[in-house]
Image (spheres, rainbow, N blue to C red):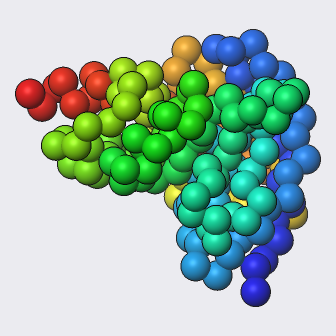
Amino acid sequence: MATIYRFEVTVSDVDRGVYETLDLRLALHPSETMRYLLTRTLAYCLCFEEGIAFSKGGLSSPEEAPVSIRDHTGALVAWIDIGAPSAERLHKASKAANRVAVFTTGDFAAIQREAANRPIHRADRIELFSIPRAFVDTLEARVDRNCAFELVRNEGQLYSTIGTTTLEGELATTTLADLLQSIR
């Protein structure tokens, strides 16, 4: 059975000019790690705009993006994935949506290995974001099932304040094409 988490996140994304307070309810499925849940929460916050939503089926809907953005007609605008999706999944995502973003913790090595020898549609338009593992792990140690925290992005740096603790880390970014070019 899933465990429900309620996060009130005050987002100040200076880089994008987005300032919102989000009241999020997320289900942590038994097969899902807290790191994955927090990474998709952070991805949602860092991509927040009108039409954003978590997938309806969560992990049980592998054909859907964990987070997506749809326009007012219901058309898929952005596919936002978590972790190290397969090359086939990235290829499918880039055909389904004009914008594809992948959020991971740590480095991009797993994505690079997966995509190195496979054709991926519009690899130059697939954005990759790496949130430091220590940032997510420290956040994980501080969250509970009902908590509030602040998330700030400013000049590529992430800051989060939860209780009396402030976390800091660099949000590394690149495109899939640039990542693959670096190994050729």
Q: What is the quadrant of residue 152 in the picture?
A: top right
Q: Nearer the viewer, residue 131 or 115?
A: 115
Q: Where 129 sits versus 54, above or below?
A: above
Q: Is residue 84 left or right of residue 13?
A: left
In this rendering, the count of numbered labels is 0
Residue found at x 61% / y 18%: 154
- Image vertical order of residue 177 relative to residue 119, above or below: above
Residue in the picture at 64% in, 60% down: 37
Q: Looking at the picture, how far across and down is residue 82, in whole percent?
A: 52, 50
Quadrant location, the N terminus: bottom right
Q: Is residue 115 left or right of residue 59?
A: left
Above or below, 18 against 123 in this view is above
Residue most toward the left? 184
Q: Residue at x 62, y 54 (%)?
A: 64
**What quarter of the picture does the C terminus occupy?**
top left
Report whether residue 155 is seen: yes
| In the rendered image, the vertical position of residue 134 relative to residue 161, given as above or below | below
In percent of width and height, residue 83 lies at 46, 53
Residue closest to the eye, 180 or 38: 180
The answer to which image quadrant residue 27 occupies is bottom right
Residue 172 appearing in the image: no
Residue 9: image location, x then y, percent:
82, 42
Quadrant of the rendered image containing residue 168: top right
Residue at position x 22%, y 31% in the image: 180
- Which residue is more in the foreground, 154 or 97? 97
